[in-house]
Image (tube, rainbow, N blue to C red):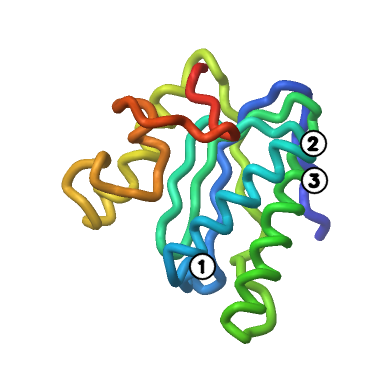
Amino acid sequence: MARPLRIEYPNAFYHIIQRGIERRDIFIADKDRIRLLEYIDSCRKAYHAIIHTYCLMRNHYHLIIETPEANLSKVMHYLNTSYAAYFNTKYKRSGPLYQGRFKAILVDKDEYLGRLSRYIHLNPVRARLVKDPIEYQWSSYKYFVLSFAVPIWLDIDV
């Protein structure tokens, strides 16, 4: 049975979830998370993708992404392929890194975006990694609530 086609159109917002295969870790060291964020910046440059929220957990990550050019599949192919190649080379492994293809949920900007961002930022709290989301280093939460310099690839003004 063929996979259903992705719904892609200009300026669409998506909640992206990508898990490690068999729920294994996809980030071992802080440098791994930094590398994924660098690839996200490359997606902005190459595909004009706009990231509004992120949270990098141990075995999965969440993004809220906007695609002005209706090219979500290209963005995610680049991001996931680049990171998997990096990870497999660094840790001398082969085979798939991810559990199937990424999950992409089309999001209504006006109705759901704020609640979704809160849900994503509370992931480390629900996983009992921290008591307060501000304590978690690998999410965009700090840019929403404190006066941190926002990375060029992150757009928090939605």
Residue at 74% over, 37% down: 45
Residue at 79% over, 30% down: 70
Q: According to the image, label 2 marks what residue?
A: 71
In the picture, measured across the screen, residue 28 lies left or right of residue 135, that is: right
- Give residue 19's position: percent from left, percent from top: 53, 60
Mark drawn on residue 74: 3
- Give residue 121's position: percent from left, percent from top: 36, 39
* Label 3: which secondary element: helix
Dot 3 amino acid type:
Lys
Q: According to the image, label 1 marks what residue?
A: 26
Q: Is residue 50 above or below residue 34?
A: above
Q: Is residue 146 above or below residue 15?
A: above
- Give residue 92's position: percent from left, percent from top: 62, 86
**Residue positioned most to the left:** 131
Residue at 52% over, 35% down: 151
- Give residue 144's position: percent from left, percent from top: 37, 26
Circle 1 packing at 10 Å, graded few (<14), some (14-19), many (20+), is many
* Mark 2–mark 3 CB contact (< 8 Å): yes
In the picture, measured across the screen, residue 6 lies left or right of residue 123, that is: right
**Disc nearer the start of the sequence (1/3):** 1
* Label 2: which secondary element: loop
Dot 2 amino acid type:
Asn
Q: Is residue 30 above or below residue 61?
A: below
* Mark 2–mark 1 CB contact (< 8 Å): no
* Quadrant of the frame with the N terminus: bottom right
**Disc nearer the start of the sequence (2/1):** 1
Q: CA distance from mark 2 to mark 1?
A: 24 Å
